[in-house]
Amino acid sequence: MPRQRYLVTSALPYANGPLHFGHIAGAYLPADIYVRYLRLAGEDVVYICGTDEHGVAATITALRENSTPRAVVDKYHEVIRRLFERFDISFDNFSRTTKPHHYTLSQEFFTKLNDKGLITKASEKQYYCPKDRMFLPDRYISGTCPKCGQENARGDECPRCGSWIDQMTLADPRCTLCGSVPELRETEHWFLRLDTLQPDLERWFGSKTDWKANVKSGPGGMLKEGLKPRAVTRDLDWGVPVPLPDAAGKVIYVWFDAPIGYISSTIEWAEKRGTPDEWKKYWCDPGTRLVHFIGKDNIVFHTLVFPAMLMGVGDYILPDNVPANEFYNYEGKKFSTSGKWYVEPERFFSRYPADVIRYVIAATMPENQDSEFRWKDFQTRNNSELADTLGNFINRALTFVVKNFEGRVPSPAALSERDRAMLESRAQATSRVGEAIAACTFRRAIEELMGFARECNRYFDERAPWKSRKDNPADCAAAMYVTVQLSLTLAALMRPFMPDSAKRTCVMLGAGDLVTSLDWAAGGTHLLPEGVALGTPEVLFRKIEDETIAEELALLREDEPAVATPAASSAPQPVQVPAQNGTSEIVYDDFSKVQLVVGQVQSAARKEGSDKLLRLEVDLGALGVRTILSGIAAHYAPEELAGRRVVVVANLKPRKMMGELSSGMILCAETPEGRLELVSPDKAAPAGSPVS
C-alpha cells in the first residue's frame, strides 16, 4: 500500500519574546503528536516551522529593550528553539524568515500576484502619530474591538473574539508607543484582491465539511459578508522590501510573508538533504496533504489569506486541514510572559520531566473551547494517572518477572481464554488511540491510552501472579508472559505523547531498538520472544508531593504583579453574582469600599534583590507620602516615572514584600501583548484628588 504524503506546519512564532505553555498547547504539541504518529504509521511526512521575524512585533520589542530588530530576533530565535528542544518537539526543519532565500521567495510571490492583477495599488487614510512621527501599522495601534467590545484590541485582530480587524474600525484608537490619539493621513499601499479571488475561495472552503466548527465559523461569516482587498504592505523599515520601483520605504506585510516561511523552510530542508527540488513534492503535488496547526487567532490567515495567495500564484496545493485550537490559560487567567503570568521554563524543566507536561497538556488541550493549566491538576494527573496507573503497572510487572523468572520473558505452557482476549485487546487499543490522533482529538487519544492502562491493571490484579507463583507456576508464567506483552504495547502507545518514557520502558523490556523499528500497528501485535532478557526495572514516573505544589502556588502569588489590572486585583472581593452578559456584578456599596485617589510619583528606584519590583514614593496629598512596591519594573524604567500622576488604591491593607511594607497599589491596564500601562489621570487633578 503506497504511503500517504503529508506536509505538516506549526504557526511560525514571533521572535519577539519567549513562548509559554499556551503557545505549546495551541500549535506545537498537537502537531508533534500528530507527526510522530504519522511517522510510526509509516506515512511520508515532513514537519516544518521557524520563527517569524518581521513586522511590528520585533520593532516594538526592540524599542522597549533599547535594541535593534535584528538583535531582538537573533536573541529570541535561540530562546524559542531551545524551548522546543526542551519540549522534545520533532521538527524536520526549523528556519527563520530573515534568511535570504525567504526574502527572494516572498518577493517572487508578490511579483507573480502583481503581474496577474491580483495586487493593486491604492491610496487610503491611515493613522499617523504626530508625536512619534510615523504611520501606525497594525500593532502600533490599539482600541476597542468593533465586534465584541474588547478594550486594547490590536489593529489587526482581537485577542478575545479572534476577529480580523481593520484598524480604521477600532473605537478610541491610541498609539501603542506613546498612548496619544493618532490622526488620519493619506498614504499609498498595495492590496491583495481577495474580492477577485472570493469565488474560488468559496468553492474550496465550502468543500471542507469535516473541519472543526471553530475553524469554519469565522471565515465562513466573512465570506458571506464579502471579502475586500487587504493591504499587503506597510510603512516600516524592517521587513521584506516591496519589489517595485515606486515602493521606497515600504515592506511586505508580515502576514503576507510569514506563511511563505512554511515554503522557504521546506526548501531549506530539501537543500540540507542534498535534494534541492524535493520540496516541490510537498508543495506542488496534489497527492500531498497540507495540515496547518495553529491557535484560534491565526484562523483567518490560514483559511482565507494564505490559500488566496497560493491560488493566485498557482501550482501550489491548498490546506487539507487546519485543526486550530482555542486558548490555553494559566490558573484562571491568560498566559502573559511580559506580565510575569507564566511558568518559567528553565525552572520548570529543572524540576519536572518534559514527558509529564506533554501528557498533561495533551490531556487538557483546548481543542474545542478554552482550557487551562492548573498546578493541582498537574499533580493529580501525574500522581494518579502516570505514576499510580501507567507507571505502576509497568514497574510491578517487570519487577515481578525479574524477581521470579530470572529476568526473562516467561514461557507460557498454555494461555487461558482471558489471556488470549487480553493479548487481542492490544490491537484494539492501538487502533483506537491511532484513530483519535489521526482525527486530531488528542484528549480522546489520551483517554484511550489511560483506559487501556487501567484495563492492564485490572488484568494483573485478577490474575494475581503473587498467588499462583507458588500453587500454579504454569498459570503464573502465562499471566506474566501476557503482562510483559501489555507493557510493550503501552510503551508503543506512549511514543507520540511521551517519547522519552516510551524509550525508557523499551529499555526495561530489553527492546530499546523497538522504539524506532516497531511501526504503529505492530505495537498492538508484536510479541517479545520467550526467554528474552529484560533490563533493569525503574520507576517511570515519580510522584509530586503536596509541598512541591504548595511552593509553586506560593511562587505564583509572589510573581503576580503588585498592581491592579483587568485580569487580577487585590482589592476587596465582593460576593459575585453572575450577570446576564456572563460577567459578575457588584453593587455601589461594594465599589465604594475602594478608596481611589490621584498620586504623584516623587521618586522611583529598583527594589534591591528583585527584577520585578520598583520602589515608589508617591505623594497622596492630605494622605501623605506612601511607599509603594509595584511590579512594573519590566515595563517602566525608574527615570520615566518621577513626576508622573497615577491612580492609587489608598485603603488597601499594607503588604510586606521582600522585607518592606508596601502601602497601596498602583492601577494599571494590561495590553493584549501583556504590557502593563499605568492609568494616568488628567494633569489638572492634583495629588490626593478622589477618583470616582
Image: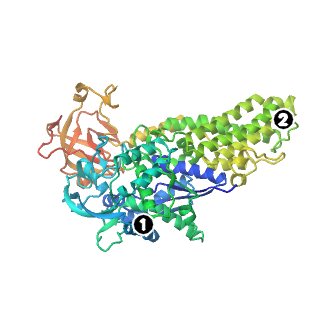
What residue type is disc 1 on?
Phe
Please state if 171 lies on the left or on the right of 53 as rendered. left
Q: Where is residue 238 in the image (x, y as percent from the top left)?
A: 34, 66
Query: Looking at the picture, does residue 678 appear above or below residue 453?
Result: below
Mark carried by residue 415: 2
Q: Residue, x 79% and y 40% (percent of image)? A: 401
The quarter in which the N terminus is drawn is bottom right
Q: Where is residue 182 in the image (x, y as percent from the top left)?
A: 20, 54
Q: Where is residue 200 in the image (x, y as percent from the top left)?
A: 43, 55
Q: Could you classify mark 1 by the number of other residues whose Cα lies within 10 Å: few (under 14), some (14-19), or many (20 or more)?
A: some
The residue labelled by disc 1 is 109
Mark found first going from the N terminus, 2 or 1: 1
Tell which of 266 and 556 is nearer to you: 266
Tell which of 609 and 369 is nearer to you: 369
Please state if 640 lies on the left or on the right of 316 as rendered. left
Q: Could you classify mark 2 by the number of other residues whose Cα lies within 10 Å: few (under 14), some (14-19), or many (20 or more)?
A: some
Query: Looking at the picture, does residue 75 appear above or below residue 471?
Result: below
